[in-house]
Amino acid sequence: MNNDKTLNNNIDTTNANFDHHQRVAIVFVNCTDEYQIQELTQLVNTANGQVVLVVNQNRATMDNASLIGSGKLDELSQQVKSLNIEVVVFQDQLSPSQHRNIQDKVECIVLDRTNLILDIFALHATTAEGKIQVELAQLKYTLPKLRSMQGELSRQGAGAGSKGVGIGTRGPGETKLETDKRKIRIKIDMLKKRLLEIQKQRDVLRLPRQKNMVPTISLVGYTNAGKSTLFNALTGANMLVEDKLFATLDTTARSITLPNGTNAIVTDTVGFISNLPHDLVESFKSTLEEATQADIILNVCDYSSPEVNKHIEVTKNLLAELGTTAEIIDVYNKIDISSVNTQLDSSIIAVSALKRTGLDKLRERIVSILNNRFCTIKLMLPFSQLNVLGLVNKYGKNTTINYNDEGAEVLTTVQRIYLTKFADYMVI
């Protein structure tokens, strides 16, 4: 027998202001982590929704037809009607058939967590590249679900466009979703080509920086950890700062002068989150590449969050997936509002980006790392591998080349992050 449980999660639905927010139910299966409920609630808030019902269904196995079972689905349908709920969001991924079955029963918009995150990205995308990346991810997500989404599209209404007012209505829009799979695949290929062109343009712009060896410092971290606030504090910029998830999507770069007189570039990137949709990571790889090309990565985390260690792990796992080799500095932000009494080790960088405290220590750590970012290497290139000299010319400086009977002996100075490019030819 299933142990069904509906949670109110301390949500007061009597005095909430719903004038500009859709009423949303969030649904979990066997959820024992309160933080998951809080995070999904915050995602809904970011999408301009208001959670009025939290449902947690305890069952031995997930139901193949509706995830939560027919009895619980009947109960949810009744609650949707009685509470005037407009959107139901499931924490777990829904298959096309589950999506269709649930939607037919509750008769409102049904999303899963992945769909909700994609919707938030569509809401916050501002640049041409950001909009392309979001549309690409949404179309990839939509492709296998076209059949189940027909009923939902009729409820959303035509012409919602990329900035529709309702949750789940942003992005490709009805006219694109109604086209057949062949046309959508053609659209996906076209968007990929446009992103590749943008990436090539970015590579061209990055070349002078690499040639002049201007160091790059990239801010990454769990969403809403205060990256944009820290970016403003370090660079004197005035980037928009919001207490929302994924407020920053598009990479922003500014030049700074470090205490030792070194000029550097600081970049702010999109925030991470646990179980970030794979299609979204793939679509945003050209943007996330700024982190993979950085000399130093500042992993900004919210020290006031009880999940701070999990956030750090999520970010580092994603950076590893992207192939990042730069040195990472964990930056514990928001120490001014943290209730944690644990004494931090003196080697840890703890700051309040908002109050601009602890930044001197952070700058000193950055300078210390940058001072050790170069090393001189010796390469032995056989005549068959002289094409590697192109990489030497691109990434090295103070280069000398001597030819002998075996090939070219090269002495050059490179940044440590590029050592892997020459590993097969290095000699001691």
Image (cartoon, helix red, strand yellow):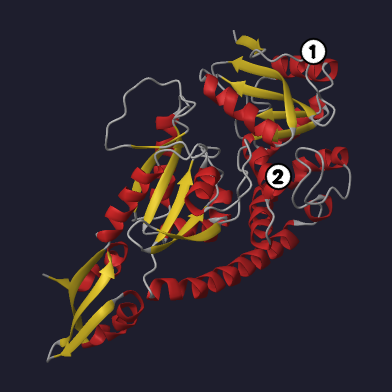
| 349, 415: nearer the viewer | 349
Element at label 1: loop
Which label is found at residue 145?
2
Element at label 2: helix
| 292, 247: nearer the viewer | 247
Residue 206 visible in image: yes
Label 1: how many Cα within 10 Å (few below 14, some 14–19, many 20+): few
Residue at the image point whose x is 50% and y is 47% from the top: 233
Label 2: how many Cα within 10 Å (few below 14, some 14–19, many 20+): some
| 399, 158: nearer the viewer | 399
**Does 80 appear above or below 249?**
above
Q: Would residue 268 appear left or right of 257 to someone viewing this image?
A: right
**Coordinates of residue 379 in the picture (x, y in percent):** 19, 76
Q: Would residue 311 appear left or right of 271 to someone viewing this image?
A: left
Q: How many marks?
A: 2
**Coordinates of residue 146 in the picture (x, y in percent):** 74, 47
- Residue contact between numbered discs 1 and 2, judged by CB atoms under 8 Å: no
**Coordinates of residue 160 in the picture (x, y in percent):** 84, 47
Residue 272 visible in image: no
The amino acid type, in three-letter code, at marker 1 is: Thr
If you read the primary sequence from the N terminus, does the residue marked by circle 1 or circle 2 appear first?
Answer: 1
Which label is found at residue 14?
1
**Coordinates of residue 71 in the picture (x, y in percent):** 71, 14
